[in-house]
Image (tube, grey):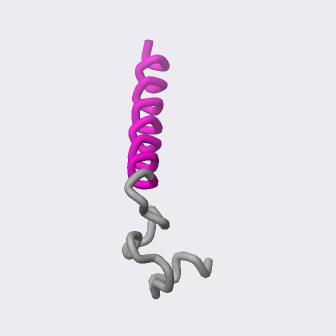
Amino acid sequence: MENIVIVLIVAGVVGLAGRYLWKAKKRGVKCVGCPDGHSCGGCSCQCHNR
């Protein structure tokens, strides 16, 4: 029974993360993890140079 609860919690977290990414891309955010995501053309956050 504990395994089912753990699987449901993990599935819920993954589902919510996927939904967040999908909605962000739908809004036009180019780089979701970037603090300057809306204008990420030449940002200085170094998220593209890793």
Q: Is residue 24 above or below residue 5?
A: below
Point 41% across, 70% down: residue = 37
Which residue shows up at 38% across the image and 55% down it? Answer: 27
**Residue range highlighted in magenta:** 1-25
The quadrant of the image that shows the N terminus is top left
In this rendered view, identify the residue nearer to me: 36 or 15: 36
Please identify the quarter of the rendering in which residue 5 is found: top left
Judging depth in this view, the residue of 41 and 20 nearest the camera is: 41
* Viewer-side residue, 50 vs 22: 22
Q: Is residue 4 found inside the magenta-colored segment of the image?
A: yes
Q: Residue furthest top?
A: 1
Q: Quadrant of residue 36?
A: bottom left
Identity of the residue furthest to the right in this view: 50
Of residues 28 and 24, the one drawn nearer to the viewer in this rendering: 28
The percent position of residue 3, horizontal first and vertical second, equals 49, 19
Q: Main secondary structure of the magenta part?
A: helix
State the residue at coordinates (39%, 48%).
23
Q: Quadrant of residue 48?
A: bottom right
Where is residue 10? Give x, y as percent. 45, 33
Residue 16: in magenta span? yes
The percent position of residue 13, horizontal first and vertical second, equals: 41, 37
Q: Is residue 12 above or below residue 41?
A: above
